[in-house]
Image (spheres, grey):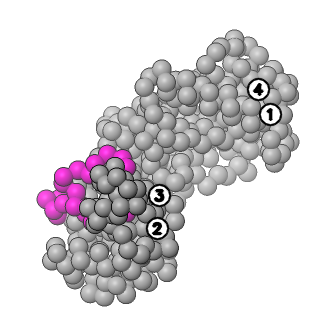
Amino acid sequence: MSDLDRVRASALMRAADLDALLLFQPEAFHYATGLDAGVAAMWRRGGAHAALVPAAPDESIAAVISDHQLHFGPPPMAAIEIVTHPIWIDYVDFSAADKPDPAKRLQAAYRQQALGGARPESFDRALVYGLIQDLLSSRQMKSARIGVDLEFLPAADFAALSAALPQVTLSDGSEVLRRLRCIKSAREIACLRHASAASEAGLSHMARNARAGMARSDLDALWRAGVQAHALAHGITITGDRAGIAVGPNLVTPDPVLHRGDLIKADMGVAVDRYLSDGTRTYSLGPPPPAAIQLYSAISEAFHAGLDAIRPGAAFADVHATILAATARLGLGDYHRGHFGHSIGASCGSEEWPFISASNPEEIRPGMVLAFEVPFYLHGLGAMMIEDQLLVTQSGIEVMNRLPRDLVDLTELEPVEA
């Protein structure tokens, strides 16, 4: 199902003087239509698929999607107009024909399904743009003002789109899309909540079973085992993950081995229906170095100062300033970080706009889900970070994480099975 709020979308498009959005990024296509763009999305080009979202909320969304992809995933909602185009994959339902001879049976299947003929090398961009032109014509939008997700669309594809739609006024709709996606639906919030819980289950399993002599890849495997055990126990389907573990003082070694006294920074994310969580905890194997204890204390104090500043109506820039003021007060005046967190959702990475940065005057709003982080990356000592996943509510924030934020000594934990 689509997570796009048509009423908010209408208001944002009208404010931007747009008649519709035309979206090409695979993640934006799924957000608008609820459909998987399919294997053609791997090209990450403007033409493998597209979603047309009219500003008028009573007009249906249209999805241009490959004929191959219609065989997979949930059926399209009746409220979405579907237009298909061929891609390189020759897919036919062989069971649909009843001829005894295999060749004749295949020929009958092709004819019954109106398939056959030449297929493009990958996808036919010109054909898709022609289908978009037909869509606009059928909706009396041949001269419409269309916002395109130019933060994604390659320049060559935009030039071809402009040539294919000479009467349409194309402009950048990326800001409208960003503002839509930063306020999460109840379903999106539920996905991120489940994802965070699964990731923390993996962290608990990793923390309780880490041993000296293990490589970072072994810790990754422990984390994933804990995630999968949690998913199985709770009936959750994991659609992806992101592991960011740093081990020991050498932050550039490809697969470092864990030794006693080493720090472990575990910045992890689990995806549920593509919505990727983001949270971090820091551990030590045995007593950490005194310098790590002192600097982690500074991280903790700055983190809690920033956490207190995050509330609906506050500016992201003010939160950033609060954290830097705290670190300066603690004697770390040279510490400057571009941002201390970001929105999260369904994207090709874990970081989305808006950012908790000095240059962002935007207000924090209810319905946002933020990853709030304060890190140090110190080659020669180790990486350390506290990061929580927060839901902004009408009255404050809800922290989705349950694990303690302390610098935890792993030798004090009891091992458990996943």
Q: Quadrant of residue 298?
A: top right
- The numbered disc on residue 369 is none
Q: Which residues are magenta?
A: 56-84
Q: Separation of disc 4 and disc 2 at Cα?
A: 51 Å
Upstream in sequence: badge 2 or badge 3: 3
The residue pinned by badge 3 equals 39
Badge 1 density bin: few <14, some 14–19, many ≥20, Cα 10 Å: some
Closest to the observer, 78 or 361:
78
Is 411 left, or right, of 192 in this rendering? right
Locate residue 384 relative to residue 65 in the image: left or right.
Answer: right
Q: Is residue 323 left or right of residue 12?
A: right
C-alpha separation, residue under disc 3 versus residue under disc 4: 42 Å
Q: Which residue is mark 1?
A: 215
Q: Which mark identifies residue 284?
A: 4
- Which label is found at residue 88? 2
Q: Residue 67: within the magenta? A: yes
Q: Amino acid at mark 3?
A: Val
Which structural element holds mark 3? helix
Does dot 2 land on a helix, a strand or a loop? loop
Residue type, mark 4 in image: Ser
